[in-house]
Amino acid sequence: MCKKIFILIALFILPLSSMAFAQAQPQKPPEEPLPVLAVPKDYRYTSRGRRDPFVNPIPKPVTPPGVAGRPPVAVPTCPQPQGLKGIMLSQAAIAGVVTARDPSMTIVIIRAPGGKTYFARVGDALCDAVVKTIKLDAVAFVLTVPPIDPKAPREIERKVRPTPGEQK
């Protein structure tokens, strides 16, 4: 008796479930999300003594393209991944050099923002440069991004212990 009831229920539920799945609408591809601080086109704000919540009260500082004779710095288009490849050469500071008898084992210690330290060998890549040579007192980098000024050097040498007044 119990088996017959189970079979009858299964016969009624099975066709009903297939009808429900057949009527399901296919999902549309998701639309592009709006920008984070997007405001609708027809939005009008009446202040009545209050500030507009969609306007940033702290304006961003305007930086001139070139500062006191310095050429503007090219912003790399590379992604900012974690690790050594996420550091730009302008952010990196040379903390030291570890030498070995075998030149391929010579390592440069690079200090990055946030108190992080990385070790690099010749040929290792940063976000916008590659380590070319490592000496006891200096490390040479070759830029991999095109500079804004075509006369700018493609190779930059950083001192391990820069003298006062020397660019780091």
Image: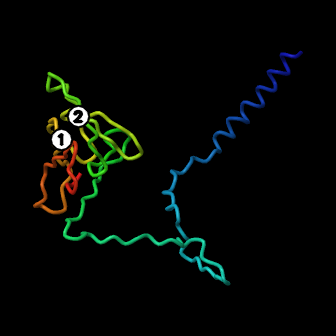
In the image, taking residue 94 as reference, residue 135 lies left or right, namely left
Whichever of callouts 2 and 1 sits on the residue coming sooner in the sequence is: 2
Up-down relation of residue 64 to residue 121 (above or below)? below
Provide residue 7's location: percent of width, then percent of height. Answer: 79, 21
Q: Residue at x 51, y 50 (%)?
A: 29
Q: What residue is disc 2 on?
A: 97
Q: Residues within 10 Å of mark 2 (few under 14, many from 20)?
A: many
Q: Residue at x 12, y 54 (%)?
A: 153
Provide residue 56's location: percent of width, then percent of height. Answer: 52, 71
Say which amino acid is labelled 1. Answer: Val
Task: Please identify, in this view, whether the residue under mark 2 or under mark 1 is nearer the observer.
Answer: 2
The image quarter containing residue 49 is bottom right
Up-down relation of residue 47 to residue 28 (above or below)? below
In the image, taking residue 63 as reference, residue 161 lies left or right, namely left
Which coloring applies here?
A: rainbow
The reply to whether discs 2 and 1 touch (Cβ–Cβ < 8 Å) is yes
Q: Closer to the camera, 32 or 103?
A: 103
Provide residue 42's location: percent of width, then percent of height. Answer: 57, 77
Q: Closer to the camera, 21 or 4?
A: 21
Q: Closer to the camera, 26 or 23?
A: 26
Up-down relation of residue 26 to residue 107 (above or below)? below
The image quarter containing residue 138 is top left
